[in-house]
Image: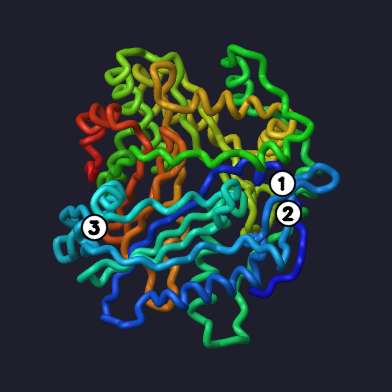
Amino acid sequence: MSVKAQEIELGAVDMATFGLNLDGVYIYKNVNTDSQFMSMERIASGFYKVVADYYPMVVGRPSVSKNGKGVMIVDPDNLCMPDIAELTVNHPAEAFFETRDNIDKAKNTVKFFNLRKFYHDSGVSRPPQATYNRDNAAAIVRVIRFAGSNYVALYISMSHVLFDGLGATMFFNNWAECTRNLDNPSHTLQNPPVNDRKIVTDYFDTVTAVEPPHTKHLKEQSTVSIMPTPDNFAPILIATPGNPAFEEQHLLHFTPDKLEQVRHDIDKAQTTNLTLAVLLSKVVLQAGIQAFNSMPKWSYVMFPYDCRKSAGIPTEYSGNLSFSAIAPLESQAVLDGSGKELAQAIKAHCSKTSGEYAKSTIDTIENEIGVLFQAGASLCNSANSSYVGLTNLRYMPLYSIDFGYGGPEILSCDYFTGEGMSRIYANKQDGGIDLVMNIKDNLFEYLKTSEELLKYADVIF
């Protein structure tokens, strides 16, 4: 791989993601019985090309500059090469599918990939975490073939330091575009990435920080003094060990009509995303009270939000520019309040996504990093708190990741970090959504029997 030597300064938000991964499991169907379907050679060649031509940071190594800043050093003689491999599972892909009837009776059944069943029954070990700490690659790719099956799975795991969710999705699509055009040496990307971190620094230099209410709340909840950020915080964050993924993963499916019914029943004036958060905050709290035999004082709802548009930063910016909007809610109010009241309360907190709040988050990372540890202690399901974190990937162009063989038929993901976190994926098979939930098995035992939840959701696993 030919890349030029360079040093890319990392922003505070990039630095805060060391130890975290971005991932995806995309299931493709070989409808034309193509013997070269999802060619390992082409997929790998496309990866090397898009990295060499557009994303050299992917093969860089993190370090600390002379002025103490975190940087990614791209050294052609010491590249952090991706780990790309192919493997065959001695089972058909269908052995790991769950199926449900399609609401459109003229269409095939809806299929879901059961990741837990796959790791338990396939004989395939979970790939290593994409991390710099054990000198693993920052990008891990597996092309997974199944015996006697026309399905192929593409597993991707990359260090979060490189991208946020929007940046990663753009990378996956650009990688696919380069793969489709390998036979055209003059091809250039239609929407090349913007990699210069300086445009973010320049923007936030003009912004005055305003502390979000949730930051003040987290400080007030701390029983110890908030740890200030050490002067040498760059090497400390770079050395962050890989956060273990949460393996108690579950899947709910909402058909389009049931999803709309959630919105109509709770508050039809609000978005689907908000009303789904209302439903989940209620049923997760109720399940937690049963599981822990305790009523927590606080319930939390979290949405990540992208700061590109409000900051006037190009959509093609590839780095981390996502922040958290958090609603701290008194649990009794969650239980007793109407859905409409709860929607208004969550919206009051989580609609505040200004650059001033984002700047405050950056200042917190750089000066009071202990607030992040307090957030980690609070944002979970326990006897002391209830938590629903929702990452909405529904409108991300994941079905367009086409390496020249058509886009994926089924979207899934690997185990990811964060108990209480959930991901929303579009399901093109019936137009509904899949909700992948990180929630403890003992808590889910209560959740899956919730009559309020089962009015709308189908429990897949």
Q: What element carries label 2?
A: loop
Q: For the residue marked with disc 2, what is the amino acid?
A: Arg
Q: For the residue marked with disc 3, what is the amino acid?
A: Lys
Sequence-first disc among 3 and 1:
1
Confirm whether residue 195 shows in the render: yes
Residue 130: x %, y % from top left: 52, 52
How many C-alpha atoms fall within 10 Å of the one at disc 1: few (<14), some, or many (≥20)? many
Question: Camera-side residue: 283 or 103?
Answer: 283
**Residue, x 62% and y 79% (percent of image)?**
188
Residue 362: x %, y % from top left: 70, 37
Location of residue 38 by image quarter: bottom left
How many C-alpha atoms fall within 10 Å of the one at disc 3: few (<14), some, or many (≥20)? many
Residue 11 is marked as: 1
**Residue, x 22% and y 58% (percent of image)?**
110
Question: Camera-side residue: 139 or 338?
Answer: 139
Q: Is residue 102 left or right of residue 178?
A: left
Q: Find disc 3 in the rendering and name its residue.
A: 111
- In whole angstroms, how far apart are the C-alphas of marks 3 and 2? 40 Å
- Circles 2 and 1, Cβ within 8 Å, touching? The answer is yes
**Residue, x 20% and y 71% (percent of image)?**
148
Q: In this view, does 165 lie to the left or right of 26?
A: right
Residue 234: x %, y % from top left: 73, 40
- In whole angstroms, how far apart are the C-alphas of marks 2 and 1? 7 Å
Q: Find disc 2 in the rendering and name its residue.
A: 197
User: In the rendered view of the protein, which quadrant contains the C terminus?
Assistant: top left
Residue 135: x %, y % from top left: 59, 52
Q: In this view, does 227 lie to the left or right of 248?
A: right
Q: For the residue marked with disc 1, what is the amino acid?
A: Gly
Location of residue 363 by image quarter: top right
- In whole angstroms, how far apart are the C-alphas of marks 3 and 1? 40 Å
User: In the rendered view of the protein, which quadrant contains the N terminus?
Assistant: bottom right
Residue 137 is marked as: none
